[in-house]
Structure formats: C-alpha cells, structure tokens
C-alpha cells in the first residue's frame, strides 16, 4: 500500500533532510512578522531549529518522517525498508536524549511538527507565541 512514487520519495527526503526546509521557513517568517525575535544556529545540544534565549525556550521543528511522528505524513511516506525504520528509531532515541539533557540545563522545549505546520502554520505558530507570552 505504498502509493508514493520513488521520485516523490527522493524529493521528500531531500526536502526533509536539508536545512531551511519549507515548514521551518514558514514558521520563522511568521514569528518575525509577529515580532518574536529568535536565534537560529544557536550553539546548543541537538542543534535546535529556533532558540529564544530570553525565554530560555528551544524550538524543534520535526519532520514527521525522520522523527517518527506516527501521523498521516509519516505513515504515507514510510516504506517497509528495515534500514530506514532502524534509522528513524535511532533518531527518536536521540531526540529523547537531547530533550532530557536540555531540560536538565533548564531549557524549555517546544516541538512543532511538520504536519501541523503544513496544515496551518498560522495556528501552529500562534500556539508557540501563546506559550511564549505565558512565560
Ligand atoms: Zn506529523
């Protein structure tokens, strides 16, 4: 039941893997518009996508496939290839380890998922801004 063509898959892969992916740009542009100043390429464990040093908040923008979200996007693009499944499980373990360490260092974590951003980046970013404003 794999309806995605190899061509689409490799396009998805390269899109998800590269820096400055579309979901990331959508989020960053809107944050900027809403007056929330953030840092990218901030030197922290796990290379978070967006950091708000003043709020002590770290934001991860997770691609559903690579981080095993278990949502529709993740499901559709998942092939039965054991190599990738193992790789994604390792990513998930790594995510947990990074998050534990960051929390230990008093960072607050906020994870945005690709599927939510693609569905409505407005709502997704608003929930992040609401969170920041509540701190
Ligand atoms: Zn997802």
Image (spheres, rainbow, N blue to C red):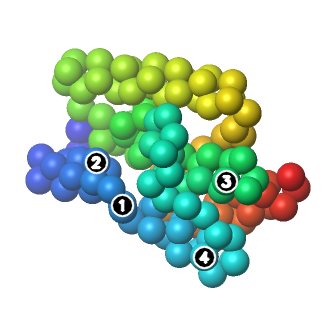
Precedes in sequence: disc 1 or disc 4: 1
Mark 1 crowd level (few <14, some 14–19, many ≥20, 10 Å Cα): some
Whether ligand 1 has any atom under 8 Å from the Cβ at mark 2 is answered as: no
Is there a contact, CB below 8 Å, between mark 4 and mark 3? Answer: no
**Residue 112 percent coordinates (x, y):** 58, 49
Residue carrying label 3: 53
Tell me if 21 is positioned left or right of 106 in this view.
left
Residue carrying label 1: 21
Residue carrying label 4: 32
Q: Compare residues 99 and 22 and report the one nearer the observer.
A: 99
Q: Which residue is drawn at 21% across and 52% down?
A: 14
**Residue 91 percent coordinates (x, y):** 39, 27
Determine whether the residue tagged by mark 4 lies in a helix, strand or loop: helix
- Rendered position, 15 above or below 46: below
- Specify the label residue 17 is tagged with: 2
Determine whether the residue tagged by mark 1 lies in a helix, strand or loop: loop
Q: Which residue is drawn at 29% across and 24% down?
A: 87
Q: How far apart are marks 1 and 4 (CA)?
A: 17 Å
User: From where the camera sits, is residue 56 visible?
Assistant: yes
């Amino acid at each position: 039941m794999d309806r995605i063509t190899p061509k689409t898959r490799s396009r998805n892969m390269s899109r998800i893997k590269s820096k400055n992916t579309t979901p990331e740009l959508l989020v960053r542009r809107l944050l900027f518009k809403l007056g929330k100043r953030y840092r990218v390429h901030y030197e922290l464990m796990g290379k978070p996508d967006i950091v708000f040093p003043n709020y002590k908040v770290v934001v991860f923008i997770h691609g559903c496939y690579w981080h095993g979200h278990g949502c529709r996007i993740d499901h559709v693009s998942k092939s039965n290839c054991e190599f990738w499944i193992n790789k994604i499980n390792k990513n998930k373990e790594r995510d947990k380890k990074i998050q534990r360490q960051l929390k230990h260092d008093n960072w607050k974590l906020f994870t945005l998922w690709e599927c939510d951003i693609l569905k409505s980046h407005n709502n997704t970013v608003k929930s992040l801004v609401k969170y920041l404003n509540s701190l």
